[in-house]
Image (spheres, rainbow, N blue to C red):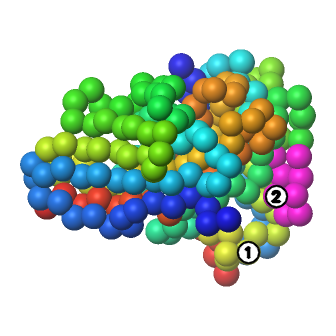
Amino acid sequence: NAGVMQNPRHLVRRRGQEARLRCSPMKGHSHVYWYRQLPEEGLKFMVYLQKENIIDESGMPKERFSAEFPKEGPSILRIQQVVRGDSAAYFCASSPAQAAGANVLTFGAGSRLTVL
Amino acid sequence: GENVEQHPSTLSVQEGDSAVIKCTYSDSASNYFPWYKQELGKRPQLIIDIRSNVGEKKDQRIAVTLNKTAKHFSLHITETQPEDSAVYFCAARLNYGQNFVFGPGTRLSVLP
């Protein structure tokens, strides 16, 4: 089992560019969560998705940020017109759909975004 | 929504001593409480969890206790070792279908 796969691991963008971060959940997991972590800070919830459905996006900034989890392929966190304040580590996590074990949250290695 | 507080923010202990980290949550309906360990530059990893129908759970040197009435839960690490040095996060979840809310983290340093 390859675990939760995130790519790219490191991404450098200039202000105003777009950043796309991808996450493939663990095999058998159908729920995906995105968290943002600023240096020396905690894990801030952004969005919770299952395939083709956003369950909770209460942590997403109203502008420039969007997320999707299509029927086929990885979940994508998209940040448009990046600003320096977007520099952070973005962690994806996944959990199973079934009630048994559905609480187990497994994290990917993270994508570190640097905005110049 | 749920809010999780965590104390202390930093903790230094001598190798071999015990460490205790405490968290409080706001929503009495939360029923699942995991603890994650994050080493520098790495992903958070689950180390222990507890459900609301249990008061205490132990796994070798780590244990978690839950007080539902007071809405707080604690992580206990005994016989600390230098490799226990990391940031520890507590979390709470209302139920299946809800997101996980994390505390701000505790940076534990185990001094040799």
Q: Amino acid at mark 2?
A: Ile
Mark nearest the camera among 1 and 2 is: 2
Q: Nearer the viewer, residue B110 or B100?
A: B100
Q: Amino acid at mark 1?
A: Gln
Q: Which mark is residue B81?
A: 1
Q: Position of residue A6 (x, y in %)?
A: 45, 60
Q: Position of residue B80 (x, y in %)?
A: 76, 69
Q: Position of residue B30 (x, y in %)?
A: 70, 24
Q: Which residues are magenta?
A: B57-64
For this view, does A92 lie left or right of residue A99? Answer: left
* A31 inside magenta stretch: no
Q: State the residue at coordinates (64%, 58%).
A: B45
What is the chain identity of the residue bearing mark 2? B
Q: Magenta region, mostly helix, strand or loop? A: strand
Quadrant of the rendering where the N terminus of chain A is positioned:
bottom right
Quadrant of the rendering where the C terminus of chain A is positioned:
bottom left
- Give the quarter of the image for residue B34: top right
Rendered position, A58 above or below A84: above
Residue A83 appearing in the image = no
For this view, does B74 lie left or right of residue B111? Answer: right
Rendered position, B82 above or below B10: below
Q: Which residue is label 2 attached to?
A: B62
| Residue that sits furthest to the bottom in the current view | B112
- Give the quarter of the image for residue A2: bottom right
For marks 1 and 2, the one nearer the N-term is 2
For this view, does A52 lie left or right of residue A115? Answer: right
Rendered position, B83 above or below A106: below
